[in-house]
Image (spheres, helix red, strand yellow):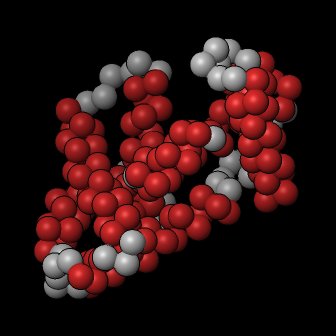
Amino acid sequence: MYIAEKLKEQNIAEYLIYMWQVEDLLRANHCRIDDVKRTLVEPRADLTAEQRQCLTQWYADLIDMMNQEGVVEKGHLQINKNVMTWLIDLHLQLLRSPKYPYYGAAYFKALPFIVELRAKGAQKDEPELETCFEALYGILLLRLQKRLVSKETQQAQEAMTALLSMLANYYIADKKGELLEEG
């Protein structure tokens, strides 16, 4: 919860990937709060009793939402889909505007990797930005499993990370009302 709040303020792209990871952690614990407490809350020696209670409640609320939204086995919570929608809208605005050539350049650097992922079976009907997020999340999972990441995958990761990092910075500027002033 505390990590999510901080990431949402500082880096919306990292926040979204973190929230996807939380969804998967809840699934790994069968969306049962007792299992979540035992594996995700109780081992946290860095938290006070009050923080543990807040974290437990946050997880319980997320589990409730996952049940209500039918994403216990797969898919993403609506709150996370909303973030993706906002980012896609911003992405498209930035690409359409001649004021952000560096963003366009970052996009075109990542585009061949996106096209390659789609050719290999990624969802062709999903937005390109979502393909980037899914690729980076997949790479995160590989690294957590201590599996080898190929040089080509690392190159794709670098290009997509640069794009999403730039987008995250523009997202912050947009939230502050500063985006239109830049250029």
Q: Is residue 181 placed above or below 161 in the rendered structure?
A: below
Q: Is residue 180 placed above or below 66 in the rendered structure?
A: below
Say if residue 125 shows up in the picture.
no
Q: Is residue 49 left or right of residue 32?
A: left
Quadrant in which residue 149 is drawn? top left
Q: Is residue 13 left or right of residue 74?
A: left
What is the x, y in percent for residue 67?
83, 51
Q: Is residue 118 placed above or below 142 in the rendered structure?
A: below
What is the x, y in percent for residue 35?
81, 24
- Residue at horizontal 27 percent and vertical 39 percent from the top: 153
Q: Is residue 95 left or right of residue 67?
A: left
- Residue at horizontal 30 percent and vertical 77 percent from the top: 179
Toward the viewer: 38 or 107? 38
- Residue at horizontal 52 percent and vertical 71 percent from the top: 85
- Residue at horizontal 64 percent and vertical 61 percent from the top: 79
Quadrant in which residue 163 is drawn? bottom left
